[in-house]
Amino acid sequence: MIIRNLEKWLILIRSVMGKLVSIIIRTKNEERWVACCLRSVFRQSYKNIEVIIVDNNSTDRTIERAKQFPIKLITIDDFIPGKAINDGIRASTGEYIVCLSAHCIPVNDSWIENLIEDLNNTEVAGIYGRQEPLSFSSDIDKRDLITVFGLDKKVQIKDSFFHNANSAFRRDVWDRFPFDESLTNIEDRVWGEQVINSGLKIIYEPNASVYHWHGIHQDLNPDRAKNVVRILESLPSLQTSTNHHQSPGDLEILAVIPIRGRTHSFGNSSLLEVTIGVAKKSKYITEIVVATDNKETAEIASNCGAEVPFIRPPGLSDDYVDIFEVVKYTLDKLEDSSKHYDVVVLLEEIYPLRNEHLIDEMIEQLVFKGQDTIMAAIQERRSVWIQTDDNAKLLNTEEDSFMPSSLKKSRALIGMLGICCVTHPESVRNKSVLDGKIGMYEIYNPFSAITIRNDLDNISVNSIKQLWKLYNEKTV
């Protein structure tokens, strides 16, 4: 009797909530995207969903990030696109099936509703949605996505185009037409051909849109693509969306402050206290960790509101140790305790004159421009020479190195990692912080680049602060 009543309640709940939608997401080293993707999926207005992650032996933190959400995980050793989707569907129970790429982000909260709206029509085999480029997508990808995924809804009777990065279909259709498990690609196009030949229809629904950071073709002509994109983006209806695929406020952002030995005094406070204070003013940083080898410094950090979960090993304080080795050690220790982050911020205490908006503006630049790393930098207008042994070589930024700096198209920038460096956890973990798409955040106040490595009294501190303030007022 109890079981029968429970079944009735489940039927009633599902009739009110709508049919169960099983969302299949295939992953392979999607650490940077999967949390953002899932965050948007679980914000949907349509709540009767289950999410199946089909992971192909990811070696990064994809699985750990995915498990922060209520998902079902299955793993596969050999990746064949159609088989991966079929395996995910076999592990699901929904009447409606949705396929979503792990690096696709639903544009709004009505994505599922719009995507499945026409599935109750038995003449429809499947629906695929729009894919929009991000502002930082390459010109080739922008061209492909803008031209292929238009603004008008289409009912395809002869056209078999279908795309599984953002698609939906009923389980009974899949029972008749499972995806081909022998194909290494375009399994969705072959499936589309089968259902069209059977007399069913495919619908393109532009209101079910996702952001997709890369395109659908492999054309390697960037110059031609650039010209096409400029024309397309000049048309008001086809302009690339300025909306952002994620908000920095939704991310887990770790600030790491590495310190060797004791912190130095900076007037009535310490350099560490000043640095923690600037980090605490950030509206995006969610956790501040001080990585130190000194118990006295650790106590000061804790009193200032930072976390010191461990005293770092003495070996990480040797002169030859890269600062990012300390950051990596810190990140590894935190991740081992089941903490996971989207962004990592490096701050050194020796730069006490940061602008209070610098950290958040750099985080925004990293997220909104899709950069791998962004570092603070200051312009060097003088000629830069590289000294090797007994030879010195001029570093040319222009053909005429002695051209007036105001006329040069390029500029020499000196990276100031310790002022602030914002990057991704996988870049720290893979020791590739300075690889990939690097952004520079230029600092115009030269006093912000001053390094303090000794104790300073109040008189010295006040003098430096006054000069820093005067320069800021002068440049406003």
Image (spheres, rainbow, N blue to C red):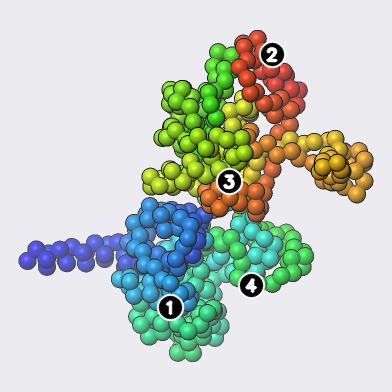
Task: Identify the residue shown where x is 41% and y is 82%.
Answer: 178
Density class for disc 4 (Cα within 10 Å; few <14, some 14-19, many ≥20) is few
Label disc, if present, on residue 83 of the rendered structure? 1
Query: Which quarter of the picture shows residue 141?
Result: bottom right
- Left or right: 455 as drawn, with respect to 170: right
Residue denoted by label 3: 423
State whether residue 281 is above or below residue 116: above
Q: Amino acid at mark 3?
A: Thr
Disc 1 to disc 3, C-alpha distance? 35 Å
Q: What residue type is disc 4 on?
A: His
Q: Secondary structure at mark 1?
A: helix
For marks 3 and 2 on the same chain, the one whose residue lies earlier in the sequence: 3
Mark 3: few, some, or many residues within 10 Å (few <14, many ≥20)?
Answer: many
Earlier sequence position, callout 4 versus callout 1:
1
Q: Disc 4 marks which residue? A: 217
Q: Residue at x 21, y 64 (%)?
A: 10
Q: Quadrant of the C terminus?
A: top right
Label 1: few (<14), some (14–19) or many (≥20) C-alpha neighbours in 10 Å = many
Is residue 414 among the parts visible in the rendering? Answer: yes
Dot 1 amino acid type: Lys
Ranked by sequence position, the earlier of labels 1 and 3 is 1
